[in-house]
Image (cartoon, rainbow, N blue to C red):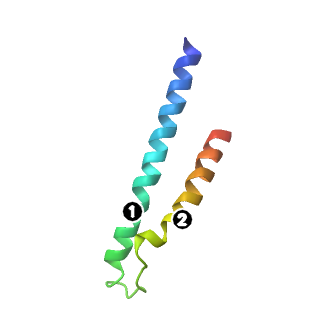
Amino acid sequence: MIRERINLIVKLYSLIDLSIILGAFPAAYVMRRQLSFLFSLPELKEIGAYLPLLFFIVPIWMTLLYLN
């Protein structure tokens, strides 16, 4: 019973962590894009150009979370 609850909590934390990562990526992109003219930063490509990076990082992050 306790072991089942622990497994449920671990899965819940993993899903929360995954949703935070998936939400932080576009949020950081939008913030960086909005601030680029303020600080004279170079323009970003469209977010679609960065999605392969997200598909590369998320599995690595989740694997490291699982191993921890």
What crowding class fits label 1: few (fewer than 14 Cα within 10 Å), some (14-19), or many (20 or more)? some
In the rendered image, the residue lying farthest to the right is: 67
Task: Indicate which disc residue 52 carries.
Answer: 2
Which residue: 40% across, 75% down? 46
Which residue: 32% across, 83% down? 38
Q: Are marks 2 and 1 in contact (CB under 8 Å)?
A: no
- Quadrant holding the N terminus: top right
Q: Is residue 21 above or below residue 26?
A: above
Name the side, left or right, on which 5 lies relative to 23. right
Decide which of 3, 60 is in the foreground and name it.
Answer: 60
Which residue: 63% across, 52% down? 60
Q: Is residue 51 above or below residue 14?
A: below
Which residue: 34% across, 77% down? 35
Count of all numbered marks drawn on residues in the image: 2
Disc 1: which residue? 26
Which of discs 2 and 1 lies nearer the camera? The answer is 2
Which type of secondary structure does the marked residue at label 2 adopt? helix
Looking at the picture, which amino acid does disc 1 mark? Answer: Pro
Q: CA distance from mark 2 to mark 1?
A: 13 Å
Q: Is residue 16 above or below residue 55?
A: above
Name the side, left or right, on which 62 lies relative to 43. right
Quadrant of the image occupied by residue 63: top right
Looking at the picture, which amino acid does disc 2 mark? Answer: Pro
Quadrant of the image occupied by residue 16: top left
Residue 19 appears at what percent x and percent y?
43, 47
Task: Indicate which disc residue 54 carries.
Answer: none
Decide which of 61, 53 is in the foreground and name it.
Answer: 53
